[in-house]
Image: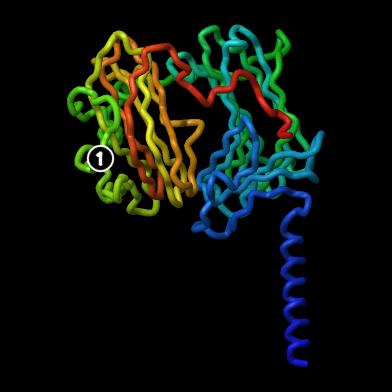
């Protein structure tokens, strides 16, 4: 009798748990699930939904999740969603796609689609950036929706952009900022009417060493190495992970620490809300025959709140930036085991300084091992993440 009572009790508990779970979660959703009430849950890249052509990112990384819904659709079989149920105002989750601009130069395009929001206390944001050949943003457009009326049903958004003849890259994204849930469906990238108004505005930036001076600016320049003398001539091939041969700024003391961990270097945060930490090497190098430089390594990271990445920067003799890449469209937060990463940058006759290393934005840990420098003597595609055309816009 006691065993029977225990069995019935267990079944009641099991049924109750299943009922609560089904009440919280849409049974028609394919979900990349993690406990959004815990900031300590490990989230790896492999737990995201498969969405070819799109890159996921979030900050704080542990607060947002992504998935497919077969119930909430505008047209077709499913939509993609981003959700954050925590009562926070800051932070955001996004999906982004980046394409080659060559086919759209001197043309007017429209990036449009549909979204539906629920329990929105933040905002839904769509943006489009246009880059020139130096990887600088030259024009930008944004459109946001942040009122309760967008909880009612599917809404259409539209961004019109006249693509300049010097554009090399177009990048567009859909974002949930703050809390709530948003579904995206039926995105479209097409020619716009001739008389449609251009939504983009000029985006002006200054070279890092040309911006206004001040304590914060000086700290930034120190951290990223602009104020660091090159170590000598650039060694080609494999670089050691010996901590004595890498540099971390004194300005990061108390925020980040660098230490040896076996055959790898470990960069970790020391406080709850640091900004960013950088470990680097910096060398002089000049060779008119070299067309590009590749920096490759293996990295892993744990409980990263924003981004863990490698980076490389090419400068001229005046330390003006000629090329820069910090894996903007491929770096990840959360936790991940060892993965191969690389950066390839163009190199020309005016280049004289090469800097490279690791980048950890906000809180977390990251390791780097097997760093390597390779010289390339033929023209190469310096952005391996670039799509030739818009892909998978209906998320099928």
Q: Is residue 354 above or below residue 193?
A: below
Position of residue 104 measured from the top left corner of the image (x, y, whole percent):
62, 11
In the foreground, 93 or 336: 336
Residue 386 figure quarter: top right
Farthest bottom residue in view = 1
Position of residue 147 measured from the top left corner of the image (x, y, whole percent):
68, 41
Q: How many marks?
A: 1
Question: Is any atom of residue 206 visible in this view?
Answer: yes
Q: Is residue 133 above or below residue 159?
A: above
Q: Viewed as shown, does residue 369 lie left or right of 285?
A: right
Q: Is residue 148 above or below residue 372?
A: below
Q: Quadrant of the C terminus?
A: top right
Q: What residue would you read off at disc 1?
A: 248
Residue 226 figure quarter: top left
Label 1, secondary structure: give it. loop
Position of residue 368 measured from the top left corner of the image (x, y, whole percent):
35, 41
Residue drawn at 34 percent across, 11 percent down: 348
Q: Quadrant of the N terminus?
A: bottom right
Residue drawn at 72 percent across, 56 percent down: 25
Residue drawn at 71 percent across, 43 percent down: 68
In the foreground, 355 or 24: 355
Which color mode does the image show? rainbow
In the foreground, 178 or 28: 28
In the foreground, 383 or 24: 383
Q: Is residue 170 above or below residue 70?
A: above
Q: Residues within 10 Å of mark 1 (few under 14, many from 20)?
A: many
Question: Is any atom of residue 218 visible in this view?
Answer: no
Position of residue 365 measured from the top left corner of the image (x, y, whole percent):
38, 49
Q: Viewed as shown, does residue 204 lie left or right of 144?
A: left
């Amino acid at each position: 009798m006691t065993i029977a009572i225990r069995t019935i009790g267990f079944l009641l508990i099991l049924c109750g748990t299943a009922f609560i779970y089904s009440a919280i979660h849409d049974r028609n959703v394919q979900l990349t699930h993690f406990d959004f009430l815990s900031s300590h849950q490990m989230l790896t890249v492999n737990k995201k939904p498969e969405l070819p052509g799109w890159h996921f990112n979030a900050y704080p990384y542990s607060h947002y999740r992504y998935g497919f819904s077969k119930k909430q659709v505008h047209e077709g079989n499913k939509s993609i969603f981003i959700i954050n149920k925590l009562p926070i105002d800051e932070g955001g989750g996004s999906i982004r796609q980046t394409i080659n601009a060559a086919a759209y130069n001197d043309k007017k395009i429209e990036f449009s689609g549909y979204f539906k929001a629920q329990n929105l206390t933040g905002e839904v944001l769509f943006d489009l950036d246009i880059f020139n050949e130096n990887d600088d943003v030259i024009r930008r457009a944004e459109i946001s929706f942040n009122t309760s009326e967008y909880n009612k049903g599917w809404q259409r958004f539209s961004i019109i952009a006249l693509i300049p003849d010097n554009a090399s890259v177009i990048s567009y994204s859909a974002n949930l900022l703050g809390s709530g849930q948003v579904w995206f469906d039926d995105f479209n990238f097409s020619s716009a009417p001739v008389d449609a108004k251009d939504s983009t505005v000029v985006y002006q930036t200054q070279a890092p060493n040309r911006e206004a001076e001040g304590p914060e600016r000086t700290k930034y320049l120190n951290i990223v190495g602009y104020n660091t003398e090159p170590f000598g001539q650039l060694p080609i091939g494999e670089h050691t992970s010996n901590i004595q041969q890498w540099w971390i700024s004194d300005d990061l003391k108390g925020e980040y620490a660098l230490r040896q961990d076996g055959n790898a270097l470990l960069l970790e945060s020391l406080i709850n809300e640091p900004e960013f930490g950088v470990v680097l090497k910096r060398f002089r190098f000049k060779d008119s025959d070299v067309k590009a430089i590749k920096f490759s390594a293996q990295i892993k990271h744990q409980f990263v709140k924003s981004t863990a990445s490698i980076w490389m920067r090419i400068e001229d003799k005046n330390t003006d930036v000629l090329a820069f890449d910090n894996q903007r469209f491929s770096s990840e937060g959360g936790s991940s085991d060892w993965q191969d990463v690389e950066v390839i940058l163009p190199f020309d006759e005016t280049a004289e300084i090469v800097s490279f290393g690791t980048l950890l934005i906000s809180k977390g840990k990251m390791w780097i091992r097997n760093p390597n420098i390779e010289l390339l003597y033929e023209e190469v595609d310096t952005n391996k993440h670039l799509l030739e055309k818009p892909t998978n816009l209906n998320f099928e």
